Amino acid sequence: MVSVGVFVGLIVVVTILSKSHADRNVYPSAGVLFVHVLEREYFKGEFPPYPKAGDSSNDPITFNTNLKGYPDRPGWLRYIQRTPHSDGVLYGSPASEHMGKPTIIEITAYNKRTFETARHNLVINIMSIEEFPLPYQAEFFIKNMNVEEMLASEVLGDFLGAVKNVWQPERLNAINITSALDRGGRVPLPINDLKEGVYVMVGADVQFSSCLREVETPQNQLRCSQEMEPVISCDKKFRAQFHIDWCKISLVDITKVVPVHSNRPDAGTGVLPDIGEYNPPSESLKNRDYFADFLITLAVPSAVAMVLFIILAYSMCCRREGVIQLVHHSSIQKSTKELRSMSKNREISWPLSTLPVFHPVSGEVVPPIHPDNYETTSMPLMQTQTNLQNQIQIPQQQSSGK
């Protein structure tokens, strides 16, 4: 595992082994980017070797990190690992309020081949630095980088070197790195080697250079509003390795920022005050009569239903319109019964399929396929093949010898 504190032109390794085999101490500075690499090679010694020689490097290993005694990491600390075959990275920017108390991070490595685990502790001791925070801060958006690529010490050192060449400060620190996905960006399509994009914040002790302030000119602001690239004279110093979106650059002078004080209530201890033990109500409760409530619940709906029934009966039986409707309904019912009885006695012509036909072999006249007692109203127009075979038995032609 490797931890680095990033300054311009200098990469300081601040990992110190403690007496415990599973603990490591790191000493990042408040307000400076902290990067800690979880190397897979370091944890492979905790797992049994692979049966085949030379294949141990292919073990898929993933990491889980959390604050000791809690399910997640501190708010300022992030973690990323793209694949089980790549190293994990812890990164973030601790603030001044985190100083003075060690932060213990539990790191659990999972070997997905053997399903074994190894657990180490990382003790983060946040130190203070002079002139914290740096008064002038600039945030750049780099379009052609992912966050794990930017966290590499060589790449981040090259970017800070280019910024120092443009800004010319005496002190320059990397303050924070944020993936564009954490700012609401979309996951890029897997075509043309597209990247997610990274926001990199740096701080310096001198005023912003004229090149950095060129983006604030009215001409460049107009080009940005029209989704056109602004004209920046120092862009060529970054273009060889870093594609910067100058329309998204942010320049902040914290000496001119008006602090906003919110009146928040004092945080308590989180423990409820002691008001004694719980006293349940006494057993001698006053009896209550629910008979009146029962009558009201049952009598009122019954009375309303009775009134509606009386009104409906009066309208249907005692008024002229209601009597007419009842008579009309009765006449319709009688007419329907009469039509049904007449339809059973009507005479219709027989369908052609039911008339007598000649037998194709003997030449005899075959009687109708329906008996005389069939009702004409229920006789189908066409007989099915099954019914025809059951009703007509074709005599077989006798041979000349019999």
Image: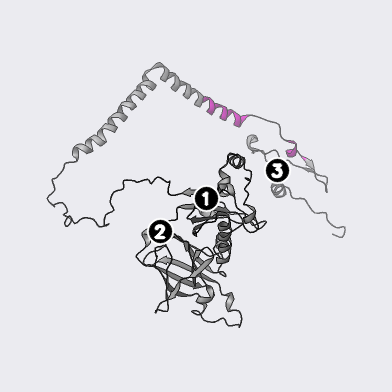
In 3D space, how far apart are the residues under numbered discs 3 and 1 (Cα atoms)?
A: 101 Å
Look at the numbered disc 3 and give the secondary structure of its residue: loop
Q: Amino acid at mark 3?
A: Gln
Residue 84 at x, y percent in the picture: 55, 69
Is 5 within the magenta? no
Q: How many marks?
A: 3
Circle nearer the N terminus (2, 1): 2
Residue ID for mark 2? 95
Q: Which mark is residue 208?
A: 1
Residue 120 at x, y percent in the picture: 43, 74
Asked if marks 2 and 1 touch (Cβ < 8 Å), the reply is no
Magenta stretch, residue numbers: 334-356
The answer to whether residue 219 is above or below residue 85 is above
Kindly identify the residue that appears in the image at 34 percent across and 46 percent down.
262
Circle nearer the N terminus (3, 1): 1
Kindly identify the residue that appears in the image at 62 percent across and 43 percent down.
227
Q: Which mark is residue 383?
A: 3
